Image: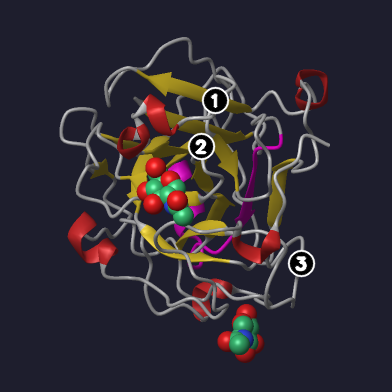
Amino acid sequence: MYWKSFLAITAIAPNVNAAGATLRFSCSQLTVERLDPIINAGVVGSPHLHQIVGGNAFNASMSGDVSTQATCTSCTPTEDFPNYWTATLFFRARNGTFKRVNTLGNPLGFGAATGGQTVYYLSSGKVTAFKPGFRMTVGDPSIRTDSGLKKYPQLQFTCLQTSTTRTGYQDNSRFFYETYWDTTPFNNKAEWPVDGSQPFVWSFGDVTGYGNHADYVFGWKGDALQRAMDANCNSDLFTNSINCATLKTQTIQQANQCTKSAVVNDNLGGWLTELPGGVKVNRL
Ligand SMILES: *[C@@H]1O[C@H](CO)[C@@H](O)[C@H](O)[C@H]1NC(C)=O
Ligand SMILES: *[C@@H]1O[C@H](CO)[C@@H](O)[C@H](O)[C@H]1NC(C)=O
């Protein structure tokens, strides 16, 4: 079983009558870190763990035009220095210990990526790109009910029978990202909870999945995103490369080289007796 969490953020209002851009590309994992420059700006050691992709200017107090501060990006467009992040997922074994679930490069074309996310910028008609300093979040880590999540219809999960199954997915956003979680190391049901409940828990202690959330700090260099949108750039569905004369790109292997070591000293390997940051599993 693979578990893909699909995080969508609606951000740009489309003009549905005109042609548009469908930019889809890979962002490898930059770092896994207990920082959150939006919700816990300036705090080294945010309450829960995140997995982050994008430019290497990512830090607790990042601000301003981050495209001028980053020296590399884990995304394939080389002028794409934003940061995109989500919480991380853990498996909780029957004996109560936790193991981190890794992300996978998207098996639909980006399998060479060291985990991370697939990012989509879509438009139909003229759109205006975000400005330096722009940031946004979707979802709320304190939600534990279906009715609570109704405020955020953009957040979706898909359980994949094979690594490429896609079913029932509906989206009308402009901008979204998706994360593949590789749950295959945890297929042994003898390790799952005795009461038959599902064994996965988000880094913020959520076993329901309703508290799923995602964050974004804009950071495209200069007018690169605007140029790509204006040129109706798209991604080739067969080669998975970007068809866009105006955007410079690097290979996934080059993007994999852009990483950042964690500044918060959490033990993230092996079986853990508690979630990073001492987060308690809770249904609230
Ligand atoms: C974090 O980034 C900001 C700019 O975005 C910079 O001024 C600051 O020095 C950085 N902090 C660290 C600890 O690297
Ligand atoms: C807890 O369970 C996991 C999965 O079965 C196992 O690998 C680990 O050794 C166990 N840890 C302890 C302390 O029993």
Type of amino acid under label 3:
Asn
- Mark 3 residue CB less than 8 A from any atom of ligand 1: no
Type of amino acid under label 1:
Val
Residue shown at the point (22%, 36%) measured from the top left: 109
Residue 214, position as x, y percentages in the image = 62, 46
- Mark 2 residue CB less than 8 A from any atom of ligand 2: yes
Residue 135 relative to residue 187: left or right: right
Residue 134, position as x, y percentages in the image = 69, 59
Magenta-highlighted residues: 211-232
- Do callouts 1 and 3 mark residues in contact (Cβ within 8 Å)? no
| 76 to 37, vertically: above or below | above
Residue shown at the point (39%, 60%) measured from the top left: 270
Residue shown at the point (27%, 43%) measured from the top left: 242
Look at the image and tell me whether residue 47 can be seen: yes
- Do callouts 1 and 2 mark residues in contact (Cβ within 8 Å)? yes
Residue 9 relative to residue 231: left or right: right
Residue 231 falls in which quadrant of the image? Answer: top left
Look at the image and tell me whether residue 101 can be seen: no
Question: Mark 3 and mark 2: span between their CA atoms?
Answer: 33 Å
Q: In terms of secondary structure, where does tag 2 sit?
A: loop
Quadrant of the rendering where the C terminus is positioned: top right
What residue does disc 3 label? Answer: 40
Residue 279 relative to residue 121: left or right: right
Type of amino acid under label 2:
Arg
Looking at the image, the residue that sits furthest to the left is 239
What residue does disc 1 label? Answer: 194
